[in-house]
Amino acid sequence: MKILKKSAPFLGVALFWVLLWQLAAWKTGTALLLPSPLETLTRLWELAHTAEFFKITALSLLRVFAGALSAIIAGTLLAALCARFKVLERLLAPVITVVRATPVASFIILAMLWIGRGVLPSFISFLMVFPIVFTNVLEGISQVPKDLLEMARLFRLSPILKLRRIYLPSVAPYFTSAARSSLGLSWKAGISAEVLAFSPDSIGKMISQSKNHLETVDLFAWTAVIIILSVGIEFLFSRGIERLGRRIGGKSK
């Protein structure tokens, strides 16, 4: 009963927009321009009963999140190194600025000249996530209380104990915030890369084919897959990251 009460506002909003979508589909009068919710759901159900659907979805997820995970690891390690060696931070600052300022489409087109279509979504996901994780973790390290560091020096704490008791609790809120906010960005950027690069066995390729063949129902169905996966994965990932943050002594920002 409590679950129904909590979900009632969400369900009401969702129903409103589905009805609006249905009215727009009736007004348009053709699935070529705007398929109805039922037509989209029916096509999605048909796709979900094929082995190719799960292969394509799994490969897209693997590509995108391989890049995102690599960026989280690299961003965290480089932030720690930059906090220790300021010259490295100065050297990386222009790179971070360029990556932040350059549109995703420009990176995708440029990267298509250098790397394969299969690797491109991972590379783009990496580029989108890395600056966010790097800057947040670096900021978290800079906010570590100086009195705690001085106390650790006086009591001659080992590097491992200093990491566990001082650095991790201070950096955890910044890390969890960066990881959570960059996840959706990496997913959208990775799918965009698949669309433009026509990556083999990918959701982006199916969207591109649907557009080229004017299969609007398929286009809506694959877009629905992207939205469902994005919401579901972000929810699970956020819960996991928040639990990790609590275990090491931090809270989400």
Image (tube, rainbow, N blue to C red):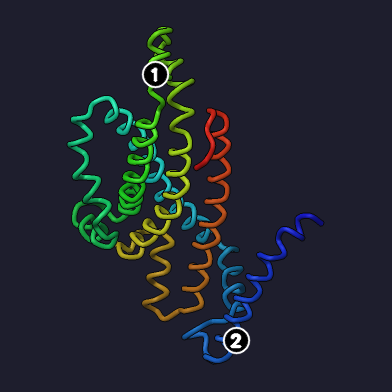
Q: Is residue 32 above or below residue 90?
A: below
Instruction: Kindly identify which residue carries mark 2.
Output: 23
Amino acid carrying label 1: it is: Leu
Amino acid carrying label 2: it is: Leu
Name which of mark 1 and mark 2 comes first in the sequence. Answer: 2
> Which quadrant of the figure has residue 111?
bottom left
Helix, strand or loop at mark 1: helix
Q: Residues within 10 Å of mark 2 (few under 14, many from 20)?
A: few
What x and y, as percent, mark residue 243?
58, 36
Residue 25 shows which numbered tag?
none
Helix, strand or loop at mark 2: helix
Instruction: Kindly identify which residue carries mark 1.
Output: 149
Q: How many marks?
A: 2
Q: Is residue 143 left or right of residue 7?
A: left
At 42% from the left and 49% from the top, the residue drawn is 182
At 27% from the left and 52% from the top, the residue drawn is 100
